[in-house]
Image (tube, rainbow, N blue to C red):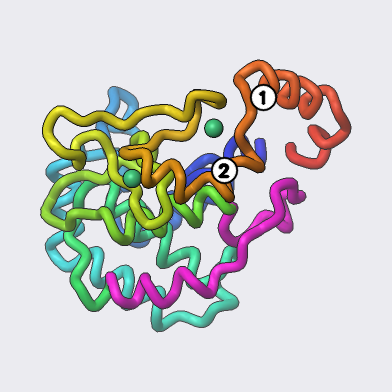
């Protein structure tokens, strides 16, 4: 399968890691909602609250300690990415990350290299650009009070902003860039501050579609399976 997107858990490697981390935790962390087939699985989903309570009972800190102790060679995608993916799984369910581990994550994520957009699965280690941005935003916006963090929520693209709809002033909603109808902003200031970077990527939906088509029919598709 490979990679079908550049965000968290949009590639096989991330999902493999999620299953290794779940095994170490002793509970399913990615597919945490139980489904009817779970009875057959050794560590099937137990639901949001049970999973969160279980991690908060020392299991999450135990995982961070275990990975920090182990040698880097033990991790196919690198120790830092394992730590980050562990944190991402914890954030998705609103588990409590102790302040010292938040600090540890803030230092460690910076060591992860950003992989090229198209990589063979074997070289597809490290972050993708959008994934790194997702994590940076999560580091500043994760409430750490039991609220699950939605990595895919629409967020303001303003540099250092990253606010989602629920985090804006009463009666304010994010607004889309008029041209691409894709990038969201909480204010004119954020839109202006992001423009220098955004203008290179800002395309009308029609332009974007044409580019997608060209990509899928081109040989690049062969490289990204
Ligand atoms: Zn903003
Ligand atoms: Zn735009």
Please tell me in which quadrant of the rendered image residue 224 appears. top right
In the rendered structure, the answer to whether residue 144 lies left or right of residue 211 reads left
Please tell me in which quadrant of the rendered image residue 157 appears. top left
x and y, in percent, of residue 169 in the image: 15, 38
Q: If you read the primary sequence from the N terminus, does the residue marked by circle 2 or circle 1 appear first?
A: 2
In the rendered structure, the answer to whether residue 101 lies left or right of residue 124 reads left
Q: Are marks 2 and 1 in contact (CB under 8 Å)?
A: no
In the rendered structure, the answer to whether residue 216 lies left or right of residue 194 reads right
Q: Nearer the viewer, residue 225 or 117?
A: 117
Q: Nearer the viewer, residue 16 or 134?
A: 134
Determine the residue positioned at 58% across, 38% down: 5
For residue 218, above or below residue 163? above
Say the numbered circle drawn on residue 208: 1
- Which residues are the magenta region? 102-128
Q: Could you say whether the residue bearing mark 2 is in a helix, strand or loop? A: helix
Of all residues, the one furthest to the top in this rendering is 206
x and y, in percent, of residue 219 in the image: 88, 33
Q: CA distance from mark 2 to mark 1?
A: 14 Å
Q: Nearer the viewer, residue 8 or 67?
A: 8
Q: How many residues crowd around disc 1 within 10 Å: few (fewer than 14), some, or many (20 or more)?
A: some
Determine the residue positioned at 17% across, 68% down: 58
In the rendered structure, the answer to whether residue 71 lies left or right of residue 87 reads right
Say the numbered circle drawn on residue 198: 2
x and y, in percent, of residue 115 in the image: 66, 58
For residue 150, above or below residue 53? above
x and y, in percent, of residue 117 in the image: 70, 48
């Amino acid at each position: 399968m490979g990679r079908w997107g550049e965000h968290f858990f949009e590639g096989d490697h991330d999902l493999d890691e999620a299953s290794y981390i779940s095994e170490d935790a002793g509970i399913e962390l990615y597919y945490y909602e139980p489904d009817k087939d779970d009875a057959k699985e050794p560590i099937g989903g137990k639901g949001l609250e049970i999973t969160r309570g279980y991690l908060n009972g020392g299991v999450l800190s135990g995982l961070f300690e275990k990975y920090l102790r182990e040698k880097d060679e033990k991790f196919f995608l690198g120790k830092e990415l394992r730590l980050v993916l562990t944190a991402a799984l914890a954030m998705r369910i609103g588990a409590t990350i102790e302040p010292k581990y938040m600090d540890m994550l803030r230092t460690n994520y910076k060591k992860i290299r950003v992989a090229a957009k198209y990589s063979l699965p074997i070289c597809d280690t490290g972050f993708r650009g959008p994934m790194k941005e997702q994590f940076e935003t999560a580091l500043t916006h994760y409430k750490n009070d039991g609220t699950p963090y939605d990595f895919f929520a629409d967020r303001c693209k303003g540099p250092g902003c990253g606010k989602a709809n629920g985090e804006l002033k009463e009666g304010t909603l994010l607004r889309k860039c008029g041209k691409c109808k894709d990038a969201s902003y909480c204010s004119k200031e954020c839109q202006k501050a992001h423009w220098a970077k955004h203008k290179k990527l800002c395309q009308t939906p029609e332009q974007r579609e044409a580019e997608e088509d060209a990509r899928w029919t081109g040989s690049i598709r062969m490289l990204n399976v």
